[in-house]
Image (cartoon, helix red, strand yellow):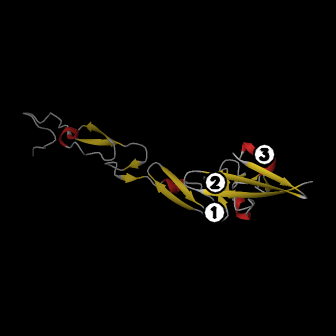
């Protein structure tokens, strides 16, 4: 019986299967010719004889209890339940308690778990609870500014543009 793997007059020449089968290895794997066959060296994330099997990275993932592991090629991510955050869902979500005031958007630093409040216009501070007194900052904020002070200081800022006309009334109490 003559094997196709060893052509030649005395059946001693090995066939280079990698040349005959240019797509023998999938997903970026490298074909290596061997005696009477070939094998594939797979790139990270793939396995199997032809590198067509995605390695389940969730099998050894460390997502915290209650989270869902999502497998990708050579990586994974954790989908956190409500109240948890972080790359592995290991941090209590500080935004759950609504620490940001005045309609500010709450974000949490995924590394240290600290709250970051993105304050709306007119407010400042760690939780956006401090009202900015536009009457004190005056012309650094407004182009035209008129203040009338009695027991309260009424500051009227008038911005005029080609297309819109609007005014802002800000009230600041004197101490």
Q: Residue at x 73, y 63 (%)?
A: 98
In what element is the residue under mark 1?
loop
Q: Which residue is mark 3?
A: 137
Closest to the observer, 36 or 123? 123
Q: Which residue is mark 1?
A: 65
Locate residue 149 relative to residue 8 in the image: left or right: right
Locate residue 77 relative to residue 14 in the image: left or right: right
Total marks placed: 3
Residue 160 locus on image (x, y percent): 62, 51
Q: CA distance from mark 2 to mark 3?
A: 39 Å
Locate residue 70 relative to residue 4 in the image: left or right: right
Q: State whether residue 38 is above or below residue 167.
A: above
Q: Quadrant of residue 156?
A: bottom right
Residue 130 locus on image (x, y percent): 80, 54
Q: Residue at x 26, y 37 (%)?
A: 33
Give the mark nearest the N terminus, 2 or 3.
2
Q: Which residue is mark 2?
A: 86
């Amino acid at each position: 019986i003559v094997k196709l793997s060893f052509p030649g007059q005395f059946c001693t020449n090995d066939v280079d299967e990698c040349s005959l089968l240019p797509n023998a290895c999938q997903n970026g794997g490298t074909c290596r010719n061997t005696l009477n066959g070939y094998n594939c060296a797979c790139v990270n994330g793939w396995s199997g004889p032809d590198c067509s099997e995605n390695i389940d990275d969730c099998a050894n993932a460390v997502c915290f209890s209650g989270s869902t592991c999502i497998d990708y090629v050579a990586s994974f991510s954790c989908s956190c339940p409500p109240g948890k955050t972080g790359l592995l869902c290991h941090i209590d979500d500080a935004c759950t308690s609504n620490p940001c005031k005045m309609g500010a958007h709450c974000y949490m630093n995924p590394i240290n778990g600290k709250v970051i409040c993105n304050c709306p216009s007119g407010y400042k501070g760690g939780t956006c609870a401090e009202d900015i007194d536009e009457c004190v900052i005056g012309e650094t904020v407004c182009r035209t500014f008129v203040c009338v002070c009695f027991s309260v200081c009424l500051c009227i800022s008038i911005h005029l543009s080609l297309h819109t006309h609007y005014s802002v009334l800000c009230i600041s109490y004197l101490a």
